[in-house]
Image (cartoon, coloured by chain):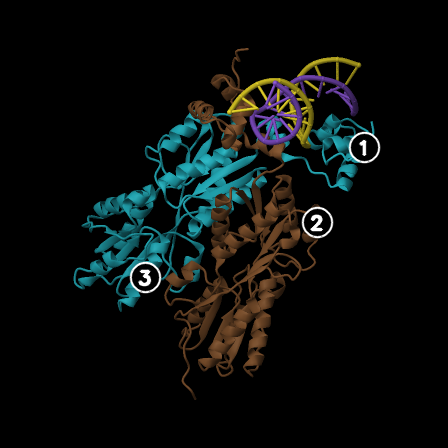
Chain colours: A brown, B cyan, C purple, D yellow
Amino acid sequence: VIGGELSMSILRIAQLTGVSPATVSRVFNQPEKVSEATRLRVLEQAQKQGYRPNAAARTLRTQRSHMIGVLLPTLLNPVFAECLEGVADTALAEGYGIMPIASGYDRVQEISSVRRLLAQNVEGLIMILTDPQEHPLIEELLALKLPFVLAYNQHPDYCCVSVDNAREVAAVVARLHHQGHTRISMLSGQLSASDRAQARYEGYLRGMANEGLRAQALIEVPFMSQDMAALDEALSDSVQRPTALICSNDLLALRCIRRIVCTGLSVPNDISVVGFDGIEVGAQITPMLSTVVQPSQRIGVEAVLCLVKQIKGEDFSDSTSRVLSCSFREGETVRTLQKP
Amino acid sequence: VIGGELSMSILRIAQLTGVSPATVSRVFNQPEKVSEATRLRVLEQAQKQGYRPNAAARTLRTQRSHMIGVLLPTLLNPVFAECLEGVADTALAEGYGIMPIASGYDRVQEISSVRRLLAQNVEGLIMILTDPQEHPLIEELLALKLPFVLAYNQHPDYCCVSVDNAREVAAVVARLHHQGHTRISMLSGQLSASDRAQARYEGYLRGMANEGLRAQALIEVPFMSQDMAALDEALSDSVQRPTALICSNDLLALRCIRRIVCTGLSVPNDISVVGFDGIEVGAQITPMLSTVVQPSQRIGVEAVLCLVKQIKGEDFSDSTSRVLSCSFREGETVRTLQKP
DNA sequence: CTGTTAGCGCCTTCAT
DNA sequence: ATGAAGGCGCTAACAG
């Protein structure tokens, strides 16, 4: 009965310790059900042999992978990297591993990426979609009864961890107005590219209406390319030129500032710029970027907590959405205008 | 023989299609060994039933998880996020999933994190360590015969994908000297914090020696905190003050620029600043950061390719290290001095 | 080209 | 408190 070249497994530890495999298993999963004496012996042997439970076998047996899939647009935008950091840390703390995939803001890739995640038998998904509206993926997940949480996205029917994009931008408009600005424009990537962009633009419109200001036409630039022609045009008319520019995200804001300065104008003296996201570097640069700071890491944290709750509770209806509040970073890219 | 509530599995598809489980398995793994007719029938049935092969079972059976573990300091520094993007994309293309964990620049966490990765039965590891010198982890992995690749780190004995940090910094020194700078200082986070920091500092010393310049004392600031006292002191003496400052990484460079400007000095008029890393945002800001651009994404890509080669080849000696070359980004934070 | 069979390593009732 | 036994879903011989 003496095993020969037994590969590393629970069985080997069992034999070496002189107990049954069941006992070894218990030591790792229900330690309280094993007498301290044998438990220590098993632990010691396991230690000595460098034994680690086989995750695949355990997953197969328990039907639990302890894996969370994460779908995000790209890690090249720090806002998502910051979020992922929050996701990673929290998942770890909750006993889950994460498997991230970037979709490149592409709906087709979003679908294929999630399929791969499903193939890995993830227990749940955290997704940052370009736009959750009528997304085939959602139906699919619902049918599979696979728990998921949307991050940054907003949708009335599904569990989302996000911010009130529209409200935040409207507040920025009010703030700028309060500082004497009336010609306030908004610049964005392609609106169709994300629900955030749309919500933020709506916030702009609402804010302008609230303040009794005339909304300007949206300055829409291709986000992926570096083409700033639309901005150039908006700046060309030095009389009608806006005094303040709200950008749909921080990366765009930086790009705008650069373009404006290259044009020979000054930020914030000639034109104020406000971003959205609150990426860390924005606070390191000079002039410090004035921006709406989303709690990106916290969004990641909450998304995991919410997802884990769903997974544990098996309760799919408990998917309480969370709208986190933003703060405004008083940077140095906004100028208070003299009253005329 | 008519199966009842058979849970989703290869067996179910087999029964429904009227073939054996082996055939279904072949359809997914060795399609060429199955007649087109039955293959199509199986595929159709699988499709209809929404069947997906169970990854855990497959892993258990084949002893291959198709998972790569990734250990990195943090995602909050864009340089690592960019690298991870490269890792993620390439791993996907190679048929692997990735599982990233952040270590927070902490050796103890590095160890515990990798343990967790091992517990997930990853087939290999990509690691960005603070310092691979005499790292207990390495011994452990070697003993386990688990393939791994170090990224950014440099070590003669193990497979690394990195850049020649020392050479690149030395080149910066030469470049600055060529532009008329002689009082060139270097600023870094704690040297002990990473082998990169050390190598870059060595490069500074070597570069200064090469140019026949007198190396200044290293300005060492705590990287994690925002404490810039050491810099303040270096700038206090307006006569001896350096005309150029080489920073050990881009994040530090941004912080320095901010501090310098807040002191009332100008970059680059009063003092030139050069970074190291080449994070994307550095090119978006104004003034554009002059810096040594590491091919971060490519480091990630190469690391995966190198790792996969090891995994496939089972050949642990084929671990050819790769030293990628950097480029210099001519930004706007360096001034060419007039000849005296 | 297809079917049969035997585990991969683990957990978990059910006995003892 | 511990042991025995079955099976999670799949693949890789080996037959036919």
Circle 3 is placed at which residue position? B257
Contact? badges 2 and 3 (CB < 8 Å): no
Give percent across and percent down for residue A288.
39, 66
Q: Are marks 3 and 1 on the same chain?
A: yes
| Drawn side of residue A129 relative to residue A76, left or right | right
Q: Chain of mark 3?
A: B
Furthest-bottom residue in view? A340
Contact? badges 2 and 1 (CB < 8 Å): no
Quadrant of the image occupied by residue B135: top left
Can residue A9 be seen in this snapshot?
no
Quadrant of the image occupied by residue B250: bottom left
| Drawn side of residue C8 relative to residue B197, left or right | right
Circle 1 is placed at which residue position? B17
Looking at the rendered image, the quarter that the N terminus of chain A falls into is: top right
Q: Are marks 2 and 1 on the same chain?
A: no
Q: Nearer the viewer, mark 3 or mark 1?
A: 1
Which amino acid lies under the numbered mark 2 shown in the image of this protein?
Glu
Q: Chain of mark 2?
A: A
Circle 2 is placed at which residue position? A140
Give percent across and percent down for residue A103.
59, 51
Is tag 3's residue or tag 1's residue first in the polypeptide sequence?
Answer: 1
* Label 3 secondary element: helix
Separation of disc 2 and disc 3 at Cα? 50 Å
Q: In this rendering, is residue B84 above or below A30?
A: below
Separation of disc 3 and disc 1 at Cα? 69 Å
Which amino acid lies under the numbered mark 3 shown in the image of this protein?
Ile
Q: Are marks 2 and 3 on the same chain?
A: no
